Amino acid sequence: MCVCPGPRRIGIPVRSSSLPLFSDAMPAPTQLFFPLIRNCELSRIYGTACYCHHKHLCCSSSYIPQSRLRYTPHPAYATFCRPKENWWHYTQGRRYASTPQKFYLTPPQVNSILKANEYSFKVPEFDGKNVSSILGFDSNQLPANAPIEDRRSAATCLQTRGMLLGVFDGHAGCACSQAVSERLFYYIAVSLLPHETLLEIENAVESGRALLPILQWHKHPNDYFSKEASKLYFNSLRTYWQELIDLNTGESTDIDVKEALINAFKRLDNDISLEAQVGDPNSFLNYLVLRVAFSGATACVAHVDGVDLHVANTGDSRAMLGVQEEDGSWSALTLSNDHNAQNERELERLKLEHPKSEAKSVVKQDRLLGLLMPFRAFGDVKFKWSIDLQKRVIESGPDQLNDNEYTKFIPPNYHTPPYLTAEPEVTYHRLRPQDKFLVLATDGLWETMHRQDVVRIVGEYLTGMHHQQPIAVGGYKVTLGQMHGLLTERRTKMSSVFEDQNAATHLIRHAVGNNEFGTVDHERLSKMLSLPEELARMYRDDITIIVVQFNSHVVGAYQNQE
């Protein structure tokens, strides 16, 4: 059962909304809450007996690189998710059963797919209180999983200053990333509120008065809220701000943004865990909170207030700053660290948190307990709860949970939980006039493109310089005919209306369709977008991107004031 919509194939007008706390003004479509049992969706959400991105991929390790899977199945349980027939040989057999035919999407069809989830928002330079350092942002998503497991969020803080923007990468289903994308910004906004405003909000709830809106959401129509869970989510959030009121007597007015971000991440993850343990008398909600807790999500969130930029990261999504040098060239400044086996400090942290006897088992084959790629994430209670607690919750849970083999599976060498945390690593950066944009993206982008290429492509797109640069062939032997083709393609693009009006869409087009010369190959792009579900995840992950463009004049004015 999954409440996540599939990718949309048509363009839909976008909107920006100012909503009170958990307003029902943005209901989720009713059909999204019907049980989706078809296509083995229920078993896919839980991975059946192992964590994997797709119901088929974890069973064909001889054909699919393990690096493409966020989870590696434990050998003893791989049979639980093995398809009834070898789908790879089946597809190969079909290939030779008929005359091979080339089928490519037309450019309008490609654009329809790439632009289906794009969203753009231009920020007013003056909102009545402050001059914004953000000109606007573009965002987009391209699914590989069905349904897509990535999420995105963007909102303006109404009771404090600044904007929040974030990308969320789900695994073992979309339930956790959906919940985090809905709830995390509220927890951050509440953590940033002064004592007096918290008291005012609590008094309004007590007396039944209308609440002050604390966030103005900027959402694509596909970025929905779970209406059925809004009351549960609100009650948990209210408990949090009540505790903040009790802890803060109002004597201190200074808010530490870094501390607020860390507290918000940790508290939401704690609430996700607690809600699953307590359960709910409503069977739908009871199953929902368990799905959220047993799936997982990474998060990369930026808070921009004037020239103060904070990035809070949990997992392996990334934040990259695009810096324009004096000579006009572009350089990338990384504002987040991946929390995985390639990060030596993360490996050391994990080993220090567990006994020396587990030094060789806590990370195996570059995965947490040999299974999980990110070392920090929301949800994933199978890496956090004790074995006794897991058994107790499963036994008292709904039949769908109790009958599922995956939920009964305990990770190997599971001795001293928790092994996983949602605590973010927070990076602070003071914006400079040469800092032109920020890219927030899930690992689906970074697996396909180098950070310097990402920044160069976005920078050239935003400055309109991409058609004036010399063509680089990178050491390849290029025939005169190939060079003529590259020049002809460039001239065609220059003579027509530029096809991408969204920087995130432009970046996805390059990520999926780039050839060895660094230019978009329509034939390659068409092939990649034509892949069926069973094959798409072999070649790439879900891709979610937010590109935030800064106002250099405003940033420079902040500097001059000091």
Image: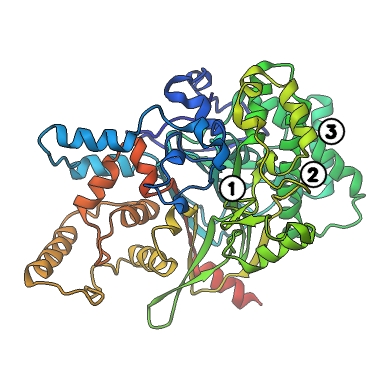
Which type of secondary structure does the marked residue at label 3 adopt? helix
Q: Residue at x 52, y 30 (%)?
A: 80
Q: Quadrant of residue 304?
A: bottom right
Give whichever of discs 3 and 2 has the lower sequence position: 2
- The kind of residue on which mark 3 rests is Asn
Which type of secondary structure does the marked residue at label 2 adopt? helix
Give whichever of discs 2 and 1 has the lower sequence position: 2
- The kind of residue on which mark 1 rests is Leu
What is the C-alpha distance between the residues marked 2 and 1?
44 Å
Name the residue that disc number 3 marks.
203
Q: Relative to 292, does residue 542 appear above or below in the rendering?
A: below
Q: Residue at x 35, y 33 (%)?
A: 86
Q: Residue at x 44, y 66 (%)?
A: 451
Residue 78 placed where, x, y %?
52, 37
Q: Relative to 537, does residue 175 appear above or below in the rendering?
A: above
Specify whether 26 is left or right of 288.
Answer: left
What is the C-alpha distance between the residues marked 3 and 2?
10 Å
Q: Is residue 87 visible?
A: yes
Residue 423 placed where, x, y %?
71, 53
Name the residue that disc number 1 marks.
371
Residue 209 placed where, x, y %?
77, 27
Name the residue that disc number 2 marks.
197
